[in-house]
Amino acid sequence: MKLWKKLNQDEIQTRIFAALKQNVNFYEENILGVPGSHLDDRVFYQDAPFLQNAPYLSTLIHNPNHIGCHTLGTSESFFHGTQQIEQELIRVCAEDILHGEENSHDGYVASGGTEANMQAIWIYRNLFLEQVQLNEIAILASEDAHYSVHKASNILQISAYKIAVDPTTREIFRESVEKTLQRALADGKKRFILFANMMTTMFGSVDDPDVLTAPLEALDLSYFLHVDGAYGGFFYPFATKNCRLDFTNPKVTSVTLDAHKMVQAPYGTGIFLIRKNFIQYASTRDASYVEGEDSTIIGSRSGANAIAVWMILMKNGPYGWKEKILTLLNRANWFTEKLDELNIAFYRHAQSNIITIREKHLNSDIAQRYGLVPDDHHQPQWYKVVIMDHVSIEKLLPLVADLQAFAEKKLV
Ligand SMILES: Cc1ncc(COP(=O)(O)O)c(C=O)c1O
C-alpha cells in the first residue's frame, strides 16, 4: 500500500482541519466574487463546541466547492486544501485498491455511479467522434448491466446493445458477445464502448473482460473497456485473489466506483477513474471562469463528500477493510448454506455478498417484511438479499425461518 494507511481519529482530524485552513475562509477574508459561502448560519451551527471534534460536519459547514477535476494540475485555488484530500483519495482508489501505476490516473468524486458511467461514455464518444460519425459508435453491455448504461445511451445518443447472459451462471459467453457484435456491425457501427461489470446490481455477477474483448480483437476493431464497479469496486478486489477488472489489466481504461454503497459514505460519492490523457475529451473550454476549467459532467459539487470517503477509508485502513469484506463473505456463506439445506434455488457469485433467490421460494409478504428487492416490481422472478454491515446473522435468522415455513407450506 502506497498511500492508504490506517489513521487514528486524532490524525484524521489534524489532516482535515489543516486542509480546511488552506481553503478560503468566508468568515474572515474579504471574498467578494464567489457565488458561494459557508452554510447559512441562521440554520446551521457554526461554532458549536462539538464541531471541534467533527471534521466531516465542519467541512459541510465550510462548504467547499470541488468544481472541476483536481488531478489535472490547476483547479479552483479557493478550495485547494480539501481538493488535495480528494486528489489523495483518487490515488488511493486507483493505485492501492485497483493497483494502477503511480500518478497515472485522473478522476473525481461524482454524484454517483450513474454519472461516473456516463462520464466514461461521454469521454469515449468524444474521442471516437474525431474518427467516425455519432451513429457509428456503439455501447456493448451485458443484459444484467445497470440501467445507467441505457440512460447514458439515451442522453448521449449512442446505441446500446445488450449481450445475453447464461440464465444459470449469469455469465456473458463468447457466442453471445459475437452475436451482439454482429448485430452492431450490421447496423454500421465501427467504434465500440465495452462495459464490464464488477458485480451486477441484481446478481453480483462479475464479467470476464477477455470474453468481452476477444471477438473485437479477432476482427481488429477499435474499442475502450470501462468497468462498472459501482457495486463491487470496494468489495470484489478484496474478495478475490485474481482481479482482472482493475488497472493491472491494460485493456481496462476506466472504472466506476461508488462509495455510497459498500463504503457507507453519504450519497453523492460515486468515483470516476480513468488512465491519464483521456479526461481531456470531456473538457468544456467554455468553462473559462472556472480556474483549470471543467472536465466533469456535474459542475459544482460538495468537497465534504470527498472528505467523507477519505475519512472512512483511512479510519479502517487497508487491513481493516479486508477484514470487513471477509466478515460479509462469511455471513453470505452462512446464509447460502442455510438456503442449500432448505433446497432453495439462488444465484451467488462466490466472491460476492449478494444472494438472489428464485421468486417461487417466497411470497410478497416475506419480501416486504425483510425489504427484499425484486428484479422487476411488476413481474418478479428474483429477490435479492444484500449482506451489508447491518445484515448480521441474527437479522438473517428470522428470514431463514420464514423461508423454511414457506417451503413446508406453513406460510402461504
Ligand atoms: C452496478 C451499478 N452501476 C451503477 C449504479 C448506479 O449508481 P447510482 O445509483 O449511485 O447512480 C448502480 C446502482 O445500484 C449499480 O449497482
Image (cartoon, rainbow, N blue to C red):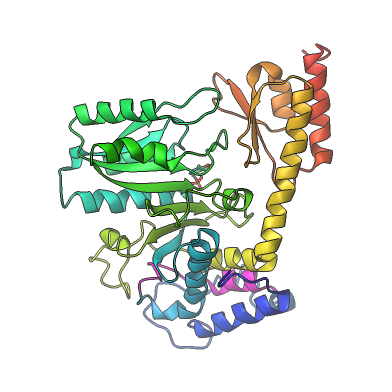
Q: Is residue 222 above or below residue 397?
A: below
Question: Could you tell me which residue is drawn at 78 percent across and 36 percent down?
Answer: 334
- From the viewer's perspective, is 399 left or right of 183? right
Count up the numbered dots: 0
- From the viewer's perspective, is 200 left or right of 405? left
Question: Could you tell me which residue is drawn at 47 percent across and 71 percent down?
Answer: 87
Which quadrant of the view contains residue 62?
A: bottom right
Q: Position of residue 140 (x, y in %)?
A: 34, 36
Question: Could you tell me which residue is drawn at 55 percent across and 49 percent down?
Answer: 242
Residue 302 visible, this angle: no
Q: Position of residue 135 (x, y in %)?
A: 19, 37
Q: Is residue 48 above or below residue 149?
A: below
Q: Position of residue 231 (x, y in %)?
A: 55, 45
Residue 167 visible, this angle: yes
Q: Residue placed farthest to the bottom in the image? A: 29
Question: Could you tell me which residue is drawn at 26 percent across and 40 percent down?
Answer: 157
Which quadrant of the view contains residue 147?
A: top left
Q: Position of residue 78 (x, y in %)?
A: 43, 80
* Foreground residue among 290 and 360: 360
Give the quarter of the figure containing the C terminus.
top right
The reply to whether the magenta stretch includes residue 23 is no
* Foreground residue among 267 and 282: 282
* Foreground residue among 94 and 30: 94
Give the quarter of the figure containing the N terminus.
bottom right
The reply to whether the magenta stretch includes residue 67 is yes
Q: Which residues are magenta?
A: 54-72
Q: Is residue 178 above or below residue 103?
A: above
Q: Residue placed farthest to the front in the image? A: 218
* Foreground residue among 59 and 93: 93
Which quadrant of the view contains residue 385?
A: top right
